[in-house]
Amino acid sequence: MRSSIAAIAFAVVASAHASESNPISKVLQMITDLQGNILAEGSSAQKEYDSYVAYCQDRSQNIGHEVKHAKGNQEALQATIEEETATIGTLQAKLEELASDMASDESDLKRATALREQETEDFASEESDLKDISDALERAISHFSKNGQAALLQEKGASSITGALNVMVDATAMSSEDASRLTALVQERSLEKTEESGSDDDTDFELGSPAAAHYESHSAGVMGTLQSLYDRAESQLSKVRQTESASQQNYQRLRQSIEDEVQLAKKDMHATKAGIAESREAVSVATGDLDMTSKDLEQDIAAKEALHHECMTAAQEFQSKINARQSEMNALSAAKKAIEESSSGALMQTYTAQVSFTQLASRSESRTVEVVHFVRKLAKRIKSASLAQLASRMSSALRLGSAGSVAPFDKIKGLLSDMNSQLEAEADAESSHKLYCDKQTSATQTHNEETSAELSALNAKFDQKKASLVKMRELIATLHKELASIARFEAKASLMRSEEVAVFSKNKAEMQKGLNGIRLALKILKEKYGTALGAISGLLEVVEADFAQGLAVLVADEESRASYYNSEVKPNFELEAAAKKADLQYKVKEYKSMDKVLSETSGDISNVQSRLNAILEFDSMIKKSCTALPLSYEGRKGRREAELAGLKQAEEGLEGTAFLETRSSRKLRGAKHSA
């Protein structure tokens, strides 16, 4: 054991006195520096890429919000256009209804005015008649009041009263019973006067005192009847005037009501027209905004796709650079390993000078040998390739001896320090890579879920639209069949009608020919034989009548069938066909619109599916980059912590400030084993 240590110590001392022109050490140092530069470059590139990833995510999120906002605006504008279009239809229907109501109100006012004018004329005539009757009765009453009973017997008075009564009877202002009674009183008094005077002349009759009592009751009856008739005439005149006044007021109220309705209708029409204009303007503005929004949406979608392509390309380039740096690091490590493992003997023979064995006895050299042994044991125990490589390089340094002015002790110390820096740099780089992996994995998962949800929604929409399209196609096919069926039935009905016309024409010609023959035969027989052949002529006349009746029935039946065909059958076919064609035209238009929407939805599905495929591809690349190592991140982290703790302990042992335990049954303080 002591001889081995002495040999190692000799090699260390020899290396310490090696010439400064040792190229192997310089090459190894240059490789180590290059590895450090690569690690620093990787760390810097990682920071730049993290910043670019944040930009991609922020930009993608902003564009996503813009797309979502544009789609919302697009749906809102489409809803506004549909709503305002429906409002225009409703307002136009209301406008037509108002116009119809105004026309109806004006017609009602015109009829009411005509009726009022007729009522006014009737009232004027009736009022004139009643005033004449009332004036006549008033004069009669005044006459009786002034002249007393004698007025009843005066011819002139009687004639006047009778005329008044006749006028009143004709005007229906008094009953025939009242007129008869008054007339009887007048005639009775006239007859008594004639008998007493013995003369037919009534003009000189005067009422004497003895007869006053006799005619007092008659006079009272006449006066009462006349007064009653006068009161009735005045009452009827007052009633007629009240009726006229009420009718005039009712007419004025009706007219005012209709005029108010017309005025309100005009205001409503004005407001409705203004509403139609506003809705049309709103539709125009919304249509323009919809066009702009649709263009902006297309630009946003294109920008999002371009950004996605750009970010995916950058991610692939970054991963390629990571792989290139890793490949470069592997190549440098392999080169260092090849140099260290293969050139130690030649290096020792070429650049190392022989020294005395007595120069190897320093205590520091003994600690150096112990440190190398400790590192090798530690590398084996925690299965660290980096520490195993370090132990090999440290052994080479001991074997090669001095390299110029750098002693093996300082060389090994430098190796420990470089390895410690390298492990710390790798830890930082791997930690950054772990953060990048976690961030990218989370973001990719979120994008995957969002895109998958969007794709599912589009697929559901596509299935729904496709089902509706299939149903619409079936309805269109049904309408085509129904139109074909209507055409067949119409053609069949037209053919049957043509056959009926042909049969009628034939039968009519035969009936007319037979009737003409019978009439010709009757004419010939009558001209030739006169009435000598009465029986034959009678039979021919019966046949003529039968033929004429048959022809009339035939013509009537044809006219009835033609009328029924032209007014019922043919219009029904035309109306039904027109309705079906209109329905077919509407459904074809709707089908084209639905097919366009389905095509657009299919395009959206294709775009979203492409985006999802890109996301899955990027996710696969991220998983490959982040999970391709044999150990998990936690395992590599634990082993690296054990390596760093071991290096720290080795540096302390090299300085003589710590005791190195190299037995495999003991563990380093703070070190962690990792499988």
Image (cartoon, helix red, strand yellow):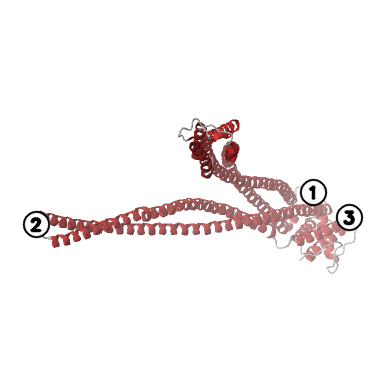
The amino acid type, in three-letter code, at marker 1 is: Gly
Front-lying residue, 316 or 115: 115
Classify the position of the C terminus by image quarter: bottom right
Helix, strand or loop at label 2? It is helix
Residue 551 x/y as whole percent: 24, 57
On residue 404, the disc is 1
Q: CA distance from mark 2 to mark 1?
A: 174 Å
Q: Secondary structure at mark 1?
A: loop
- Image quarter for residue 576? bottom left
Residue lying at 10% horizontally and 53% vertically, measured from the top left: 527
Look at discs 2 and 1 and give the one toward the viewer.
Answer: 2
Q: Position of residue 175 (x, y in %)?
A: 53, 43
Query: What's the amino acid at mark 2?
Result: Tyr
Give the percent coordinates (x, y) of residue 211: 57, 37
For disc 3, the marked residue is: 655
Instruction: Residue at the far bottom: name it.
Output: 665
Q: Earlier in the sequence, mark 3 or mark 2?
A: 2
Q: Nearer the viewer, mark 1 or mark 3?
A: 3
Helix, strand or loop at label 3? It is helix
Residue tagged 2: 529
